[in-house]
Image (spheres, rainbow, N blue to C red):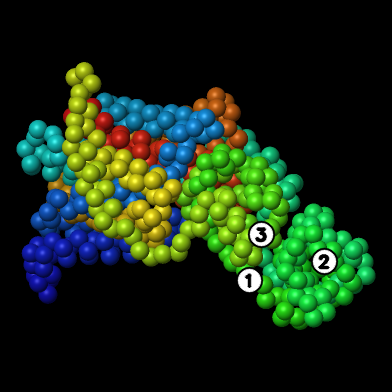
Amino acid sequence: MTEFILHALRGNPEIAVFLAIALGVLLGRLHIGSFHLGSVAGALLVGLAIGQVGVDVPVELKSVFFVLFIYAVGFKSGPEFFGSLNRGTLKLVVFSLVLCMTALGSILLMNVVYGFDAGFTAGLGAGALTDTAIMGTASSAIAHLSLADADKAQLNSHMAVAYAITYLFGTVGLIVFVGTIAPKLLRIDVRASARELEAELGIDNQDEVLSIPYTRIVVRAHQLQAGQLVGRSIAAIERDFPALSVERVVRGTQVLERDPALVLASGDILGIYALRESVADLAYLVGPEVDDPRSLSFPTRTADIVLTNAALHGHTLHQIRTRLVGAGRMGCFIDEITRQGLPLPALPNTVLRRGDVITLTGRTASVEALAAELGRIRQRTYKSDIAVHALGMVLGALLGMLSTHIGMIPIELGVGGGVLLVALLIGWYNSRHPEIGAMPAAAQWAFSEFGLTAFGAVVGLLAGPAAFEAMREQGLALLLSGMLVTLLPPLVALYFGRYVLRLHPMILLGALAGAQTEAASMNKVIEMSGSNTPVVGFTVCYAISNVLLAVCGPIIVFFAT
């Protein structure tokens, strides 16, 4: 039986690849407390183990899987990357630049101190910074070195070993630093700091926006009795009571559609949108709740609206409200605002950018009218524009093959860098012209997750039997180097961001997580603070650092060779 399995693995490398992926994902799901390896590190470790039997995996597979991953990352980051290149986000761009430069300097310093080769150095950077893109672009650069195939294979093997050794502390160390050490160094209470930032963003004036519920919208029918609402128009009532919206009025046998100028009379049955927390006050404010299908049968819709209107880019929610159709409530409520799939604090002074997704609930006509003002309704589709994306990968690979020189230094994007650049452009263009280059969020996740996990598995398989010997020789040096590369860049960036850029502590913590492309540490801060405000700093830095760290791969190989 054992001989049959070994023969199957050696004779059919595709079996070894998918086995490493499957077992690696399962290994990555195991939790020790709140920590888990993740799919990529799990697949790489399983690949290292399976690779000891001598599996002959085509080296080209590594590039194919990496292209899938880096293309998905670029497509997703495109709108935010180009949208962040403005004066309003300049501080966050500079912050990412400082952290990435410090990280690159730390990696090259460890190369000098310990005399690592290019493989060890690139793997050190990828693992300590938990950014596998470094390993992908470095691998592409190694392929272009004037070395024998055996030497290139050894460098790639060393890269896998260094990644495996440094990744564990890289993940845990950054989460601990951002979630525990950084708040202590800043001498802040994260919950109090989050409340402070929310106040700056206008939480005390949230009624000035369309309406910002923290819970779901409910629909109720109440019969108006003699009281403070009788004889007043719908517009006047909604101005004084922003937590409700009158959508339909039944007066005797008449069904009156919403008209802000309509004056209410005693006995009217009102179809009302309200925030869930305001339902208890409706009986006192309006009158008894009744079961009247006529008043509740107005058409409603919930839609995801992508902000594409250039005139609204960079404005706050409150500013955008005043420029909407009629500058009125229009019977709509904001359910959620997301940026790169992450929830933003839906507060009046939150600044929106093109590509942000606003989820609105309200009357169908009102939602569609607001969508026309804001941008476009995001269609829920499962189809991807495969032709555009495949051509994008081709163009990116061709672009990556071009090279030039600055003095004595050869400059070449490499396949990974070229594909990343083209994907950024296509993602940005799609955010403005959705009919070209569609790729639903689920498809983006599949490209990214499968591509990166499979890349890790192939890297581990290719490392071969020599991996553990390299681990024995350089293990301690790599571990110590990884600890420094993990902790020094965020430490420098923390003080630079706080005392030079003057970033708010919550935005700073989100920026730290984003600049090292590590969502787990941001989620830790969100959990501790009970606020989504760190997302404001995370998304810009995440998009910028995804590009900068990927570019570091060829630079590391050049200086370490």
Task: Say what secondary structure mark 2 lies in.
Answer: helix
Identify the residue shown where x is 49% and y is 32%. Answer: 86
Image height of 290 relative to 407, above or below: below
Q: How would you rate the neighbour count of disc 2 (Cα within 10 Å): few for under 14, some for 14-19, many for 20 or more?
A: few
Task: Say what secondary structure mark 1 lies in.
Answer: loop
Residue 467 vs residue 385: left or right?
left
Q: How would you rate the neighbour count of disc 3 (Cα within 10 Å): few for under 14, some for 14-19, many for 20 or more?
A: many
Where in the figure is residue 239, as x and y percent of width and height? 79, 54
Identify the residue shown where x is 47% and y is 37%. Answer: 84
Residue 375 vs residue 394: left or right?
right
Please name whichever residue, 191 or 288, is drawn nearer the observer in this view of the structure. 288
Q: How would you rate the neighbour count of disc 1 (Cα within 10 Å): few for under 14, some for 14-19, many for 20 or more?
A: few
Q: Is residue 129 visible?
A: no
Residues under numbered marks 1 and 2 in contact, where contact means CB atoms less than 8 Å apart? no
Where in the figure is residue 444, as x and y percent of width and height? 36, 56
Please state which of the two labelled residues, at mark 1 or mark 3, is closer to the viewer: 1
Q: Earlier in the sequence, mark 1 or mark 2?
A: 2
Q: Which residue reaches farthest front?
A: 254
Identify the residue shown where x is 86% and y is 72%. Answer: 224
Q: Earlier in the sequence, mark 3 or mark 2?
A: 2
Q: Earlier in the sequence, mark 1 or mark 3?
A: 1
Specify the quadrant that holds the N terminus. bottom left
Where in the figure is residue 184, as x and y percent of width and height? 59, 37
Q: Which mark is residue 332?
A: 3
Residue placed under numbered mark 2 in the picture: 281
What residue type is disc 3 on? Cys
